[in-house]
Every structure is written in C-alpha cells, then in structure tokens.
Amino acid sequence: MIDPALLAAYDRPVPRYTSYPTAAQFTPSVGPAEHAAWLRDLAGGAASLYVHVPFCKELCWYCACHTMAMNRPGTLDRYADALIDELDALSRTAPGLILEGVQWGGGTPSQLGATRLRAVGECIARRFDRHCDAEISLEIDPRHCDREMAAAAAAIGVTRVSLGVQDFDVTVQAAINRRQSYEDTAAAVDRLRGAGIRRFNIDLVYGLPRQTLETLAATLDLALKLGPDRFAVFGYAHVPWMKPHQKLIDEATLPDNALRAAMSALVAERLVKAGYRRIGLDHYARPDDRLARAAADGTLHRNFQGYVADRAAFVAGVGASAISTLPQGFTQNVADPARYMAAVADGDGFATARGIALTRDDRLRAAIIERVMCQNAVDLGPLCREHRVDLDAYLATLDLRGLERDGLIRRRGAKIAVTQAGRPFVRFVCAAFDRHYVGAEGRHSRGL
Ligand SMILES: C[S@@+](CC[C@H](N)C(=O)[O-])C[C@H]1O[C@@H](n2cnc3c(N)ncnc32)[C@H](O)[C@@H]1O
C-alpha cells in the first residue's frame, strides 16, 4: 500500500519522459530544412526507422495517440504513396543509412491493408540495408487481423507484433468503445503464429473507466493465457483538452489515484509471479527476451516508442506526427494526415512542423533522465564528465531534498537510486532534472 499522503503530494501532472526535452518543448523554429540537414549526419551510420500510420477502423475513446477513423481506400492509397515518397527522400538525404530496427506504429498500421503494407514494406527493403538481427515490429489491431494480413506482415519481414488489448472486461470495453473478445484475440495470435511470427507483445491499460481490481485481475489471467513474450501496461492518460473524444468518457467512472496505484501494484505482482521481468515503468518481458536482457546488462533505452533494446541512439521517423531523434535534436512531422500528404508532395519530401535543437545542458539532463527511467539509478559523476560539466556546480543546481525526505530516492554523493517505494513515482524523480517542468495542469496527464 502506498501512503495516501504521498499519493496526494504527488497527484499532479508529470511527463512520461519518452524524450528530454519532451514534445511539449518543440517549436516551429525547426522545419524541413533543419530536418534534412540533421538527417545528413546519419549518412553511412545507423538508426532505427519509425513508420507512423495515423488511421484506425474506428476510434477508441481512451486513445491518446495521433490517429483518426479512416476507411476510405483513396485516402489510404495516397497515404501509402506519401510514406513511400518520404522514405525515398530519407534514403536520398542519408545515403548508406543502416537500419538497426523498424517499428510500425499508429494508429493501426494494419489499417493500411495487406497490399499497401507490402508496398511500403518493400520500399523500406529496397531503399535501406538492415542490420542482420534487426527487429521489425508492427502494431496490429487483433480484431482486424485476417490470414492475408498475417501473411503480408510475414512477407515484409515482421519479427514481432504488438497487439492492443487494453482490457477484456465487457463493461470496461463498452466504456472505452472497444469491443474485443478473448477468442478473437487468440485467433489473431494463432494466425500470426501460423504465418511464422512468434514474438508478440500485448498492450494493456490500467486506470480505465469502470475498471476494478477484480476486472483487471481477470484481464491479466486471460492475457497470460495468450503467452506473449512481453507486456506493455500503461496507466491511462486522460487528456481531454488534447483529445476531445476522451470527453465521451464519464470522468466519474475513472479510478482515483489510490486505486490506480493499487492497480499498478497488482499488475506488477501478477506478471512478475508469472515469470516476467519488470522493465522500467510499464513494460514486462520474459527473462530470455531481448528487452529483459538489455535491462539486465544496462543497454536498455527509452525513446518515443517506449522502452527499446535497439543499439542505435537515433530514430528516423516517417509519417504524420512521426518524431525523429537525430544527432542534433528532435524533429516532428505535421500531425494532420491531409497536411502531411500535401507537405510531402509539395516540398522536398519532408513534412517537418516543429522540433528542438539540443544544447549541452539538454544532453546531460536527457542522459540522466534516460538512466533513471531505464535503471532506476544514476551516477552523475561519469555523466557530468562525459558531458564536460563540472559535477559540483551541477549538484549545486539540484534540489533533491523533497524526494529524499519522502523516501523516493537514496543519495550517496553523486549516486542517486530510486527506492522500491519510489518506483511508482519515478517520473517525479526525472522531473527534478527537467529544467522545463512546472507541474501545471493542461499538458500532461496526472496519476500514477
Ligand atoms: C498506438 S496504440 C495502438 C493500438 C492498436 N492500434 C490496436 O488497436 O490494437 C498503442 C497503445 O497505446 C496505448 N494507449 C493509447 N492511448 C492511451 C492512453 N490514453 N493512455 C494510456 N495508454 C494509451 C494502448 O495500450 C495502445 O495499445
């Protein structure tokens, strides 16, 4: 049980730190010219590729991703063409780029349909060399994964599929507008296995409307029966000011912070008992899984796709709203799909709308925050040396007394460790290193 006074003290919005600075700090001062110039630094080097498809068959009310309901074949055709144009521009701008991994995210990439998915996948294979053990992962909506889709995924080399479940309880499903039976989900897993894709993740969410500890426990039992090698179990982010469709969710039916904390603890207990290792804030993996091995040997990374075991520090993102992590900074494409397609067609193949150039100070803070998010511990000494920052001067700028007093961290000189009690609050530990953090309403979601 988490102390209710502690929960109350930390009941304020805080970023998920999939990057530092976070996307809230991106500005339009970074556009296609900077994106192209920064991509040139990747020529002959290595990066992961992220492909965003901002479409779903229908909209789930809880969703905070950049997506929309889209079933018009003409629009899907034009979107696949735009992805191919942007991939062409990427390969021209960063010739010799070697892909350490490819992630298809959304939205729902499988919403492109088998033929378009193959066309874009074949373009990637034609334009880029891949590292021999590169993982190619694809998000699939299990409710719409027929044999043809499973075969198309296998044909473009997909090695891992990420399946959205969220919750198996029918009352919760009605409250989030996502009806999905266990049987349909299991059938999708069988089809993917039949096509030769054996590695898969399941996404669940706690903190959903009408969810209780009992419904969550039942969902976990069913999800475990599917036998995934990884789980991602996110805390529901309620951000109706950014995602107006979330207003369809009755806020009175949302679990409070204390119940959310109990749910998070239940998830950890059940999945760890079932043999999964807890990875960072919200991922779980079998001990022999690449993610668990990366966590064990200290090579786990965190980027906009969550926790990753990629060796490459950089990500080239294509598609509407896609974010690139480049040597000089972050860039993000325009989020609106129509504007994305127009921008790719009009200019030099890029649709960058905003971003941020990194300063030396940002790089040090980013490195600290990534260690804390991935390892629950950081030694500021070596990081300050690596970033040529005076350790004593840097320590003097930090105020960690509140976190220490609350028992969330233990500090010995420059070594900081998140305590067991502090793990649910790890994002607040990161916030202590975030120059931009104000803890105000209206940006990030609240709750553990
Ligand atoms: C981009 S979605 C892809 C889901 C996939 N399209 C499907 O329908 O199965 C990736 C994951 O983000 C998580 N997610 C989306 N909205 C969220 C929110 N508001 N709070 C927490 N997690 C969320 C869900 O677990 C979801 O499966």
Image (tube, grey):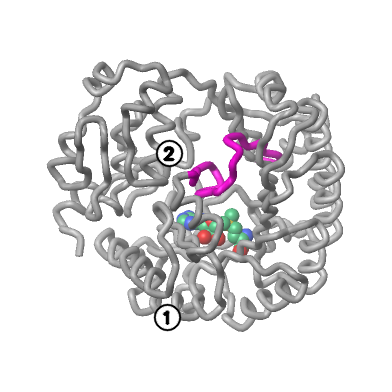
Q: Is residue 201 magenta?
A: no
Q: Quadrant of the C terminus?
A: bottom left
Q: Residue furthest bottom?
A: 183
Q: CA distance from mark 2 to mark 1?
A: 33 Å
Q: Where is residue 123 drawn, in percent x and y?
A: 85, 45
Crowding at dot 1, Cα within 10 Å, few <14 / some 14-19 / many 20+, comes out as some
**Point 49% across, 60% down: residue:** 232
What residue is pinned by disc 1? 218
Between discs 2 and 1, the one toward the N terminus:
1
Vertical comparison of 391 with 308: above or below: above
Residue 245 visible in the shown view: no
Quarter assignment of residue 369: top left
**Is ligand 1 less than 8 Å from the beta carbon at label 2?**
no
Q: Quadrant of the N terminus?
A: bottom left
**Is ligand 1 less than 8 Å from the beta carbon at label 1?**
no
**Ligand 1 position by quadrant:** bottom right
Vertical comparison of 34 with 201: above or below: above
- Secondary structure at badge 1 equals helix
294 sits to left or right of 147: left
**Point 61% across, 62% down: residue:** 162
Give the foreground label among 2 and 1. 2
Q: Where is residue 238 drawn, in percent x and y?
A: 42, 53
Q: Residue furthest front?
A: 297
What residue is pinned by disc 2? 370
Tally the marks. Answer: 2
Magenta residues, as a range? 299-320
Residue 258 visible in the shown view: yes
Q: Amino acid at mark 1?
A: Ala
Vertical comparison of 108 with 24: above or below: below
> Camera-side residue: 178 or 7?
7
